[in-house]
Amino acid sequence: MELRQLRYFIGASEAGSLLKASTRLHVAQPALGQQIAALESEVGAQLFNRSSRGVTLTDAGKVFLDHAKVVLSDIERARDAVRELGSVPRGEVAIGLPTTVGLTATVAILSACRTRLPEVRLKVVEAYSGFLREWLQSGRLDLAVLFGDAIEPGLLKQPLLDEWLVFVDGPTGPKLPKRLPLSALARRPMILPGKEHGLRKIIDDACAPLSIEPNVVAEVEALRSVKLAVQSGIGATILPLGSVAEEVAQGNLRSARLESSAMTRRVVCATSMARPTTPAKSAVHSLVHDVIRDMVLSSAWPARWIGEIP
């Protein structure tokens, strides 16, 4: 298998036509078709559906496309790593942030990167932590902030902090005490994510030993929609304090600590042990660690720092 075959395959998949791809790639159409046919023969599967209207990926082609992009990306990273030895870190680094973390830290990370690593171009991806974990393992991300420090094959996790999960209610209604018993979740209408969501699992695991059944009136995954629903008085929710700090300060939401030591969430910075490192990747890893540490120690991120302190 040759690198040019992978480039031809990716080019054809993006163009949707061998004719268009041959023009873009500056290669004769018959030669392009022969190289793709040879690639299909080597992988033992048809990668394209061919018709008079062009080409579309088969199911095997869709799977192969993800791997082909990773291979070419690794080649580019290898070249960059050699070129960057002893020089200023440069190039693209892809980092993944869960939505609640992105809301708290994205701007600070971007600002610090522009100052400390001006030759590095950050690609920030915000998504659910489960997706980020998969993309980190597949090579689409260089590092990711994830929840939980449980050992996972192929991942190296650096614990950063424990953040508090708080009861969040709308701006009106009965006065909230500074602390609420966990049993309040059975009495108040609650808007929570679905049972497969990591945050919901923490809540359910904390309630189960006490035989508390949260009064869930709606399951909503999108953070913005949850906050808007709570603000409108439909129900209360549970979120990290940092993700609602701005709304609480403005009086649009109210929060209260829950009387349960289980209502915390560990935040880690994860990398794939199977992926090669580069000077830029190492520099961004250190930068993310430093930025989040400074935010916690300055109380900009309400949490308890558990990582290293120089």
Image (spheres, rainbow, N blue to C red):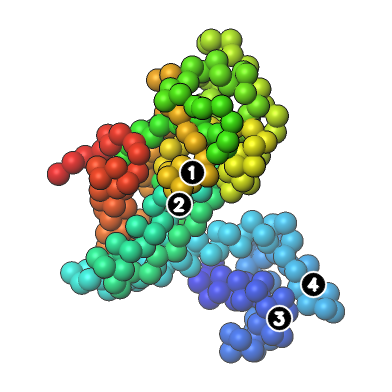
Question: Disc 4 marks which amino acid?
Answer: Arg
In the orientation shown, which residue stands out farthest toward the top?
210
Find disc 1 in the rendering and name its residue: 251
Tell me the CA gap for discs 2 and 3: 40 Å
Earlier-in-chain disc, 1 versus 2: 2
Q: Earlier in the sequence, mark 4 or mark 3?
A: 3
Residue 143, image x, y percentages: 40, 52
Q: Residue at x 45, y 37 (%)?
A: 240
| Residue named by callout 4 | 50
- Distance from disc 1 to disc 4, alpha carbons, whole Å, reads 59 Å
Q: Amino acid at mark 3?
A: Leu
Task: Classify mark 1: residues with Cα within 10 Å, few (<14), some (14-19) or many (20+).
Answer: few
Which residue in the protein does label 2 denote?
A: 102
Is residue 277 visible in the rendered image? The answer is no
| Residue that carries the numbered disc 3 in the rendered image | 18
**Does 188 appear above or below 285?**
above
